Image (spheres, rainbow, N blue to C red):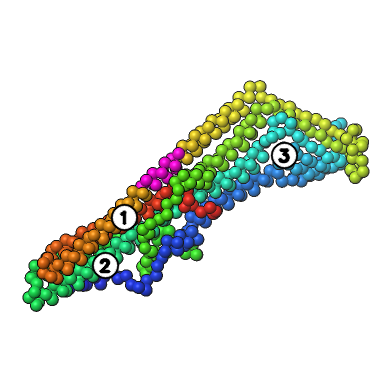
């Protein structure tokens, strides 16, 4: 029987000095240091870099063209053309430059001497409302928001996993403490029974009966200890320090008590909130915004291409006075280019494809919203049922505790047996384990409902 006491020393008792590791404290450590948050921010940073890249299409450009030709002492030509050009985000482009040309063999369309110009290029049909550069920039802006919602959805799933692991660890701790307490009671009972046997008041069968109960609880305690350590290791997957290094959960830390009652929100309000802010649904909203840009671009591609070009010219350099007269009436260069595909098959195909993608995305968004609502309502039914089960299980446990106490009182009066006491005790252990199991399922259902509504994810990353 001394073996039982040796086994008991293998398991650390729950001491008063152990530090509590609350659920809020765990979430704080998880959110501040877990690499998933840094990865999400880096992912969003990449889309921001794509936006910066798209904006580069609207950066002003400065160019210089210079050509010289000299042969046999003859100056054939000397051409020099510095120019600055800006593609505006509104479709038109502005440019200004200076042509300096001289030589004996200049082309007929080249003006000798110094010629300054300011000009505008404007698409009046295709490209007026949307062009590829503007579409790329607008899509990049939308992608930042969409990617943020995709990362929030990923973190919403990760928060649920972390939450379930915490409460699984907390439950296994409560289960282990249950067997520790029962082991203490069974050991005291064995000591009293042994003393009674030595004094002739108890039989050898009673002593063996008490010893078997200690052995049985000891085995259950070992299983609970292994389960506790396993769940602690699983929880450590979500624990990282400030230096970005993972660490194992300290064995001196203990979880908070399992909550018995959790405030359940109004179902209709929860469904309404999920429709507004669930990251899956908001991601679809931004995806539709991007498709709207694509649709506008493809609709523009159905139009003919007509680009107007107008340059104001001046010999030598422009002066501040009288740009309007005579330059706009006399000194100018004007032209246009026009192009249209005969059948527009490429443009019509792109436009039709975008329309179908929008229809598909709307249907997927609607299907996803309905699935989310069903999950929210399903978890609400489950929560109500588990709340009733938890009440019943607690009541059952209290009744078994009463019966055990009453049986021990009768045993002390000589009107009961150790067999009945142990039988009552085993029923009480089963009932308390049932309470822990139902309580864990109740907590999981509560957080799964919040996960289904998209409320576990942080609002900002």
SS class, disc 3: loop
Is residue 278 visible in this depiction of the protein?
no
Q: Nearer the viewer, residue 107 or 369?
A: 369
The mark lying in front, picked from 2 and 1, is 1
Q: CA distance from mark 3 to mark 2?
A: 75 Å
Please provide percent x and percent y for residue 103. Answer: 89, 38
**164 or 7: nearer the viewer:** 164
Residue at 85% of width from left, 39% of height from top?
117
Q: For the residue carrying disc 2, how many other residues have a C-alpha within 10 Å: few (<14), some (14-19), or many (20+)?
A: many
Residue wearing tag 3: 90
Cα–Cα span, label 1 and label 3: 66 Å
Which of the numbered marks, if any, corresponds to residue 391?
1
| Residue wearing tag 2 | 180
> In the shown orientation, is residue 210 left or right of residue 118?
left
> Mark 3: few, some, or many residues within 10 Å (few <14, many ≥20)?
few
Q: Looking at the rendering, in which quadrant would you find the C terminus?
A: bottom right
Q: Position of residue 434 (x, y in %)?
A: 27, 56
């Amino acid at each position: 029987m001394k073996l039982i006491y040796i086994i008991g020393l293998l398991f650390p008792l729950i001491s008063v000095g152990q530090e509590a590791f609350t659920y809020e404290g765990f979430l704080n450590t998880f959110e501040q240091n877990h690499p998933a948050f840094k990865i999400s921010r880096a992912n969003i940073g990449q889309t921001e870099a794509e936006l910066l890249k798209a904006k580069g299409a609207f950066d002003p450009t400065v160019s210089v063209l210079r050509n010289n030709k000299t042969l046999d002492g003859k100056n054939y030509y000397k051409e020099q053309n510095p120019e600055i050009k800006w593609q505006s985000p509104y479709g038109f482009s502005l440019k200004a430059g200076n042509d300096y040309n001289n030589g004996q063999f200049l082309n007929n369309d080249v003006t000798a001497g110094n010629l300054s110009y300011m000009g505008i290029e404007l698409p009046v049909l295709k490209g007026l409302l949307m062009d590829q550069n503007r579409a790329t920039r607008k899509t990049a802006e939308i992608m930042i928001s969409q990617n943020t919602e995709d990362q929030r959805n990923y973190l919403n799933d990760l928060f649920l996993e972390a939450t379930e692991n915490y409460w699984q660890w907390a439950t296994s701790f409560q289960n282990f403490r249950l067997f520790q307490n029962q082991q203490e009671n069974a050991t005291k009972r064995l000591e009293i029974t042994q003393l009674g046997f030595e004094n002739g008041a108890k039989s050898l069968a009673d002593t063996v009966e008490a010893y078997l109960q200690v052995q049985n609880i000891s085995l259950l305690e070992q299983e609970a200890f292994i389960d506790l350590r396993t769940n602690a290791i699983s929880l450590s997957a979500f624990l990282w320090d400030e230096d970005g290094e993972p660490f194992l959960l300290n064995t001196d830390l203990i979880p908070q008590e399992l909550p018995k009652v959790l405030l359940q929100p109004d179902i209709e309000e929860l469904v309404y909130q999920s429709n507004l802010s669930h990251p899956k649904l908001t991601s679809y909203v931004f995806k539709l915004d991007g498709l709207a840009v694509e649709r506008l671009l493809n609709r523009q591609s159905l139009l003919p291409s007509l680009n107007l070009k107008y340059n104001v010219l001046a010999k030598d350099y422009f002066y501040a006075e009288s740009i309007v007269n005579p330059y706009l009436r006399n000194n100018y260069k004007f032209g246009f280019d026009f192009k249209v595909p005969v059948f527009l098959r490429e443009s019509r195909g792109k436009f039709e494809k975008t329309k179908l993608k929008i229809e598909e995305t709307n249907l997927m968004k609607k299907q996803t919203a309905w699935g989310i609502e069903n999950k929210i309502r399903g978890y609400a039914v489950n929560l109500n049922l588990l709340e009733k089960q938890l009440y019943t299980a607690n009541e059952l446990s209290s009744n078994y505790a009463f019966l055990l106490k009453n049986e021990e009182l009768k045993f002390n009066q000589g009107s009961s047996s150790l067999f009945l006491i142990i039988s009552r005790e085993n029923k009480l252990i089963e009932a308390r384990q049932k309470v822990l199991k139902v309580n864990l399922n109740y907590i999981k259902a509560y957080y799964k409902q919040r996960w289904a509504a998209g409320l576990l994810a942080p609002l900002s990353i």
